Image (cartoon, rainbow, N blue to C red):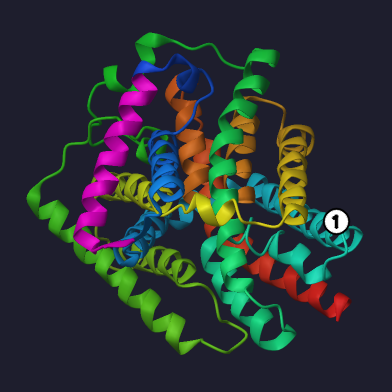
Amino acid sequence: MHLTFSAYYTLIFAALVLLLGKWLVQHLRLLREFNIPEPVAGGLVVAVALFVLNQTLGYTFSFSSELQMAFMLVFFSSIGLSANFAKLREGGRSLLLFLAVVAVFIGLQDLVGVSLATMLGLDPLFGLIAGSVTLTGGHGTAGAWGQVFEREYGIQGAVTLGIACATFGLVIGGLIGGPLAKALITRRRLAVHDPAAAPEKQPPLGESASHGGFENPEQTRLITTSAAIETLALFAGCLGFAEFMAQFTAGTLFSLPTFVWALAGGVVIRNTLDYVFHFQVFDRAIDVFGNASLSIYLAMALLSLKLWELAGLAAPLMVILAAQTLVMGLYAALVTFRIMGSNYDAAVLAAGHCGFGMGATPTAVANMQAITNQYGPSHKAFLIVPMVGAFFVDIVNATVIQLFIRWLH
């Protein structure tokens, strides 16, 4: 029997997933110790429950992706709306250095995938599908490139396979980032947890606060009805810009995923309001909407996780994905962490890299939040990772994928 849930019911289930995840993290020390994000904790439990129902009673489930896409776009819009040019300049050399680290890893990820696929007797393009196409690229890139592989290179089922690999990466990215960063922090004594500094015990943000945002998702933010309405209008502008640009640039050299245009729209709108109209954007309202959208998006993504499809993956592809997981962890610990300074900020950056290197930028932010909630804020990491993971990495990834395809064919 197949059960389909509308957008409204999907939203209700997502809220329940978040509540379950919050309860699990609060009551299970293991989850807190390994800094597992709440949406990942709750989502995996529900995914396992749905898998059991599928295997025992034959039920299959479909959840609406309409709102999931909308919340994802709102999240990326919030990143753009929070990034004025002053913040981009603040990133400076560290942002460029982190981008270079990520670019090298994308090439390594595809090299590992293609090499193992060849060794296992598969078409080398399967290595790209189990490489940066789905892991660094995520579900959107997996769907887009999957159609290309099916249409132009005869890889049947590339879209379905890509979505399954991207889902695997989304889960693994949320599972390895927190524990890896925690190990780096504790082994090198980079930070000491201060219970008195926990976000829930901090005072509400005032007008003069310069930090917060994704760094402190649980911190109280005082917003008004008018500010909420203004902020919704800003998000609507970002989504409208994204939809227009995605359609306008389709099939051109400037074709980018819709969420990248949503982020770019946020940057354009924010800086136009700041420097042309001298309009003060209400950052705290943007933070609230952005953090809520992040949690709901992850809950919906994991709620839609079909473990019975992952269980059907061919053994060779599972070998490739296992190797990719190992490579990601080693690279983040031995390269990302060291090159970015071998300090607390570098550890948080390593957790973020695991998030979008295997899954998606929302997973990266959730990983970093799990760390900073325990050890304290990392303004540098929250400045760099969202911009690199949501914007620059897609441009680099598309270039690397095309180079590998030309090399293989």
**Residue that extends furthest to the left in the rendered view of this protein:** 225
**Residue that extends furthest to the right in the rendered view of this protein:** 119
Look at the image and tell me in which quarter the C terminus lies: bottom right
**Residue that extends furthest to the front in the rendered view of this protein:** 57
Which residue sits at x=63%, y=42%? 354
Residue 349 seen in this snapshot: yes
Q: What is the span of residues highlighted in magenta in the rendered image?
A: 1-26
Which residue sits at x=69%, y=65%? 129
Against 258, is 170 above or below?
Answer: above
Apparent side of residue 243 relative to residue 361 in the rendered image (left or right): left
- Position in image of residue 283 (x %, y %): 29, 47
Is residue 341 magenta-colored?
A: no
- Position in image of residue 95 (x %, y %): 63, 49
Apparent side of residue 323 relative to residue 345 in the rendered image (left or right): right
Q: Which corner quadrant of the image does residue 393 belong to?
A: bottom right
Q: Which residue is mark 1?
A: 116
Apparent side of residue 27 relative to residue 247 in the rendered image (left or right): left
Against 269, is 360 above or below?
Answer: above
- Position in image of residue 309 (x %, y %): 54, 57
Which residue sits at x=52%, y=58%? 390
Which of the two residues, 380 or 209, is positioned nearer the viewer here? Answer: 380
Element marked by disc 1: helix
Against 87, is 16 above or below?
Answer: above
Which residue sits at x=23%, y=37%? 207
Which of the two residues, 237 or 25, is positioned nearer the viewer here? Answer: 25
Look at the image and tell me in which quarter the N terminus lies: bottom left
Mark 1: which amino acid? Leu
Is residue 10 magenta-colored?
A: yes
